[in-house]
């Protein structure tokens, strides 16, 4: 059997409201470019038929109908905000088909929130048909072997909230970033591809704006950068791309790296 190279697929490239936003008639929301139709932020690493998903947001079912073919080895959670966990129940088809618990990994705070929010899935006497899951607490700077892929967890600050980014081989995926301390930068050396969140032009208290994101990219110096977690406050895809330096690209749903 031929071994496949590592692949990262962007499942969703929007912020918490998605794009288009309900009731909005801005240029991005009215765009006819399919790249401007953005599900909530998520991604999947895949290799040799194994998948490791990053976050299960509200659009998880639709995302996996398009891109979720293979064995789901694990889910890694960046943090517990609704746009990153709300689709957890749609893990059920994988549980049923694989006939095994799906392991979920996150910071202790995140695992506690998931267990509370989806308490029906972790009851001592669960209702038939609930997702069968196992919970695993992890910390920043930890190494993990999942689905034959080697991951390192990256410390990220989402405003003041500690969350996680993830590196696998020479690809890193960092969402909801506001600050990266030196410990994170040290874990991000030698990247071929960086996927980095970037909310809008205007400064924000818990997300990088475009100016800040470009400064982070200079510090990390990857060969290629993809921007994700994009809001409708940016102009449409093609127009935004014209604002970016060489080596930095506007991400979109379904982009494979």
Image (cartoon, helix red, strand yellow):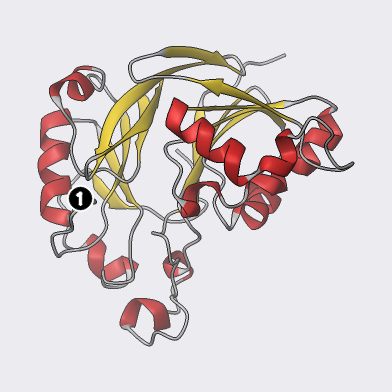
Residue 7 in picture, x, y percent from top left:
51, 31
**34 is higher (above) or lower (below) than 155:** below
Q: Count residues near mark 1 (Cα–Cα under 10 Å), then give few for <14, some for 14-19, many for 20+.
A: many
Q: Secondary structure at mark 1?
A: loop
Residue 255 visible in this rendered orientation of the protein: no
Of 28 and 99, nearer the camera is 99
* Residue at (54, 51) in percent of width and height: 57
* Residue at (46, 26) in percent of width and height: 108
Determine which residue is flagged by label 1: 208
Pick the quarter of the image with the N terminus. top right
**242 is higher (above) or lower (below) than 212:** below
**176 is higher (above) or lower (below) than 7:** below
Judged left or right of residue 160, residue 27 is right
Judged left or right of residue 126, residue 164 is left
Residue 20 in picture, x, y percent from top left:
45, 74
Judged left or right of residue 61, residue 148 is left
Judged left or right of residue 129, residue 179 is left
Residue 62 in picture, x, y percent from top left:
65, 57
Pick the quarter of the image with the C terminus. top left
Residue 5 in picture, x, y percent from top left:
53, 23
* Residue at (48, 57) in percent of width and height: 40
Dividing the picture into quadrants, the one containing residue 109 is top left
Dividing the picture into quadrants, the one containing residue 88 is top right
Of 126 and 221, nearer the camera is 126
Dividing the picture into quadrants, the one containing residue 200 is bottom left
């Amino acid at each position: 059997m031929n071994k496949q190279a590592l692949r990262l697929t962007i499942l969703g490239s929007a912020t918490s409201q998605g794009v288009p936003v309900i009731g909005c008639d801005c240029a991005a929301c009215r765009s006819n470019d399919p790249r401007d139709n953005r599900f909530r932020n998520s991604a999947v690493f895949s290799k040799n038929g194994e998948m490791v998903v990053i976050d299960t947001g509200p659009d998880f079912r639709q995302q996996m109908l398009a891109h979720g073919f293979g064995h789901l080895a694990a889910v890694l959670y960046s943090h517990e905000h609704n746009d990153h966990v709300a689709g957890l129940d749609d893990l059920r088809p994988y549980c049923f088909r694989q006939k095994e618990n799906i392991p979920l990994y996150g910071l202790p705070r995140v695992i506690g929130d998931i267990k509370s929010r989806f308490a029906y899935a972790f009851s001592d006497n669960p209702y038939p048909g609930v997702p069968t899951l196992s919970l695993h607490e992890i910390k920043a700077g930890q190494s993990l072997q999942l689905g034959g892929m080697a991951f390192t967890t990256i410390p990220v600050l989402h405003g003041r909230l500690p969350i996680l980014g993830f590196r696998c081989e020479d690809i890193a995926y960092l969402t909801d970033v506001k600050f990266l301390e030196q410990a994170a930068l040290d874990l991000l050396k030698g990247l071929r591809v960086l996927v980095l969140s970037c909310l809008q032009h205007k400064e924000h208290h818990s997300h990088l704006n475009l100016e800040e994101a470009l400064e982070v990219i200079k510090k990390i110096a990857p060969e290629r950068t993809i921007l994700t977690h994009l809001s409708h406050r940016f102009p449409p895809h093609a127009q935004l791309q014209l604002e970016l330096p060489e080596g930095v690209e506007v991400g979109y749903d379904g982009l494979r790296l």
